[in-house]
Image (cartoon, rainbow, N blue to C red):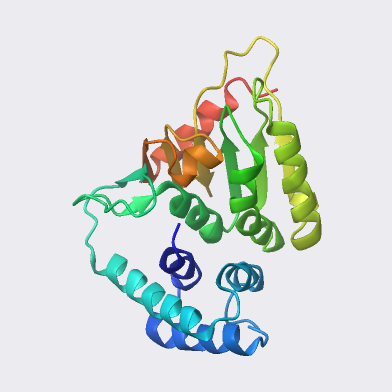
Amino acid sequence: MDDAELVGGVLVDVADPRAAACDLATILVGGGSCGAMFDPVLVDVLRRRLGSDPHRIERACHLGAAWVMGRRSVTIAEPWELVASLPGGTPLPPGLRRTTGETLVQLAVGATRTLRLAAPFIDQVAITFLADSLAAATARGVSLEVLLPTRSTHAGSALGGLERIIRAEGDIARLSVAALQDDAPWAHLKVLSADAIAAYIGSANVTGAGIGGRNLELGILVRGTAVATVEKVLDLFRA
């Protein structure tokens, strides 16, 4: 995910992205408090990412506003959008507007009630990338459930890292880890659902390679009542 996408994730729901981008740049350059204007956890993520260079901050905020405006100008007729993981700098072909990491973060940022995450492989790199937005969601009162992978050798340490970040930045009571029944088939599905109305479904594991572009991955962001059925699939073999 580049700087513009990361800033865009903070600005995605504001009424006036250009004005909000100017306010965000002022906050980041001056080191002030964001108050109720922006999610403070996501602003801290930007501070760590962009550093103290005012030119980089102002450019990233300008591009982030343009990114949001561009997304809003696109008419989406289908209840789904294509999502991909591609190497950094790879131009997106026509019709492809979303990257996997960006999509997962936006689902976490937009959730108001529930987030459910399932993947057969989870590692520390990807969890670190997602953890701030997941922690911020729990701080807003969102319940986060992770379906525990049964064969992932790195899942334990990754989920331990997620727990530490949520304890520091969110509400640990909102995190739960669900297990599969003993006789359940291997859960090879990769899903992040939000509020049972939007979900990523695709090939990408929650790993640095899966969402960071070292692997080539394809998936979809689907919206609507069908997502409730996706969640029912997650419940079929849940202990």
Whether residue 71 is visible here, answered yes or no, is: yes
Task: Examine the image and state in which quarter residue 126 appears.
Answer: top right
Report the number of numbered marks. 0
Identified at 66% across, 61% down, the residue is: 136
Q: Is residue 53 above or below residue 11?
A: below
In this picture, residue 45 sits left or right of residue 73: right
88 over 123 or under it: above or below? below
The x and y percentages for residue 9 are 47, 65
In front of the other: 218 or 3: 3
Which quadrant of the figure contains the N terminus? bottom left
- The foreground one among 219 and 176 is 219
Q: In this view, does 8 lie to the left or right of 150?
A: left
Tell me what residue is drawn at x 63 percent, y 83 percent: 34
Percent coordinates x, y for residue 23 in the rendering: 51, 88
Left or right, 143 with respect to 107, comes to right
Instruction: Give the farthest residue toward the left.
Output: 94
Which image quarter is the C terminus in?
A: top right
Task: Kindly tell me whether residue 15 is visible in this rendering.
Answer: no
Residue at point 50% right, 53% down? 107
Rendered view: 48 above or below 106? below
- Residue at 30 percent across and 47 percent down: it is 79
Residue 193, given in percent of the width and then of the height, sits at 51, 43
- Nearer-the-camera pick, 34 or 129: 129
